[in-house]
Amino acid sequence: MTLPMNLLYLRQRTRRFFWWLDHFLVDGIRAIRILAPVAVATLTSACVVSDFRGDGKLVDHGPFAAKDRYVLDLGPVDLSRTGKYTYTMSNLPAVDFVIGLEIVEAEANQFTGNRPAHSGSIRLLLETSNHEIVISEDGPLKSWKRSFVKGNFESFLYRAGEEHWISNNDGTTSPVPDGVRKDGGWGTYFSPRPDTTYRLTLEVLEAQAQPRPARLLVTGGGWK
């Protein structure tokens, strides 16, 4: 049976439409498969923060970093001799940071056993350009808190401030930090203002008898 011209025309247009839709979807899916890994890699890869000004290199590990999204590496520190190191930094991201020493241990870290011997003593002082004290901590390294990952060789030594606990109406308790300084300075934690220049001083008060390689780091951010 011969179809009328208008039905033939409609059928032809319909075929063309579905041909175009099929190729559009196939090309679109192909493009997603190609570009999606690139997009994820771009978002998760580390990059240097261009707005930062000061010593060291500030690296952004991306919005998907669970912790330590931003890492400012201020370089190696010689713990085998007494001495003083000074640094400046400005335009830091507006997140909570903690300053500490990353020390390479002689053996891989384990959850059991004794803590590695961290002899020596240091002082950390962080001030604004107006000489307002943000952080002022000193003492033997063995008294500093230690953070590490099992199996890794690096330990991160830092200080937490004093705190007290209060009772809530629901029967729970909550910690309240004591002695918080300018810009949230508490232990070696602080919350920088982007428009503020900071001066950081690290002083080795007592040298380590058996020093390990160490670097001064400022880390912060992450979704956890």
Image (cartoon, helix red, strand yellow):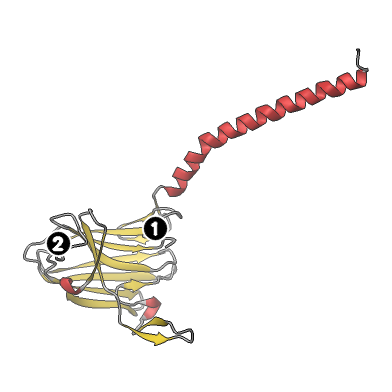
Q: Nearer the viewer, residue 40 or 183?
A: 40
The secondary element bearing badge 2 is classed as loop
Q: Is residue 36 left or right of residue 116?
A: right
Image x and y of residue 73, in percent: 29, 58
Q: Nearer the viewer, residue 161 or 136?
A: 161
Q: Residue at x 74, y 27 (%)?
A: 18
Residue 78 is marked as 2
Where's the N terminus, which quadrant? top right
Structural crowding at the residue carrying mark 1, measured as other residues with C-alpha within 10 Å and reported as few (<14), some (14–19) or many (≥20): some
Q: Nearer the viewer, residue 46 or 13?
A: 13
Structural distance between the alpha carbons of marks 2 and 1? 26 Å
Q: Is residue 10 left or right of residue 114?
A: right
Against 65, residue 124 (above or below) is below
Query: Residue beneath label 1, please?
Result: 69
> How many tags in the picture?
2
Image x and y of residue 76, in percent: 20, 58
Image x and y of residue 175, in percent: 38, 81
> Splitting the image into 4 quarters, where does residue 125 fall?
bottom left
> Splitting the image into 4 quarters, where does residue 16 fall?
top right
Q: Mark 2: which amino acid?
A: Asp
Viewer-nearest of discs 2 and 1: 1
Residue 16 is marked as none
Pointers 2 and 1 in contact (C-beta within 8 Å): no
